[in-house]
Amino acid sequence: MSVAFLFRSIVCFLLVVGVSAPVLAGEPTEQIKQTTDKILSIVKDPGLKSPSKAQERRRLIRKSVDERFDWEEMARRSLGKYWAQRSAEEKKEFVALFSELVERTYMGKVEDYSGEKVQYEGETIDGDYAVVKVTIITQKNRNISVDYRLQKEGSEWLVYDVSIEGVSLVNNYRSQFNSIILQSSYQDLIKRLRAKVTQE
């Protein structure tokens, strides 16, 4: 399953999660809904739809996403065993590049929303960790299972991984990153990430 497909599904979930009222929704689901409401208000705002407002629209969407995603935790898990080998400065750079890569992919799909619906399948909380399970129903009546994995930081539930039909976004990236490092080097991975995030 490609990263592009994963993100198309993630975006569908984020944009429709606020449409159907969850049954017995707990704190993690409610906080995801808060983020979703912000994104929906930005996407639907007539004052932000013109091409001249594209930069402002993306900035606001990115701010909303940043509030709900734990970029350092996602980056750490995505780099896997190579994370511990990195210096503090390298970790900081990797988190910045990783978040930029994910956000660019995410925002590139936001406007693909076309009326998908969602059903809540339940929420489980185990200490400071939670999983919100949903099913996305596409316009072609295809069901896509989505698991949001969250970790509690203070009073906030932050996303550290998303699984689409059993395929983890973090594991998907880890496989790609590890392959590049094994075939070449960490420096080559960073070079490729820099190139990707500077592409227009």
Image (cartoon, rainbow, N blue to C red):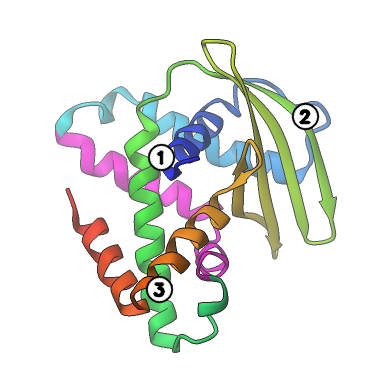
- Residue 163 got which mark? none
State the SS at label 1.
helix
- Viewer-side label of 3, 1: 3
- Viewer-side label of 2, 1: 1
Residue visible at 54% across and 50% down in the picture: 169
State the SS at label 2.
strand
State the CA–CA distance, disc 3 to disc 2: 38 Å
Residue visible at 21% across and 62% down in the picture: 195
Please identify the residue farthest to the left as the structure is shown: 52
Q: Which residue is mark 1?
A: 4
Please identify the residue farthest to the top as the structure is shown: 140
Task: Please provide percent x and percent y for residue 97.
Answer: 35, 65
Classify residue 61 as left or right of residue 80: left
Q: Nearer the viewer, residue 116 or 192?
A: 192
Work out whether mark 3 precedes mark 1 in sequence or the reverse, and give the earlier one.
1
Name the dominant secondary structure of the magenta segment: helix
Q: Are marks 2 and 1 in contact (CB under 8 Å)?
A: no
Residue visible at 29% across and 74% down in the picture: 188
Is residue 179 part of the magenta span, yes or no?
Answer: no
Residue type, numbered disc 3: Ile
Residue visible at 44% across and 59% down in the picture: 176
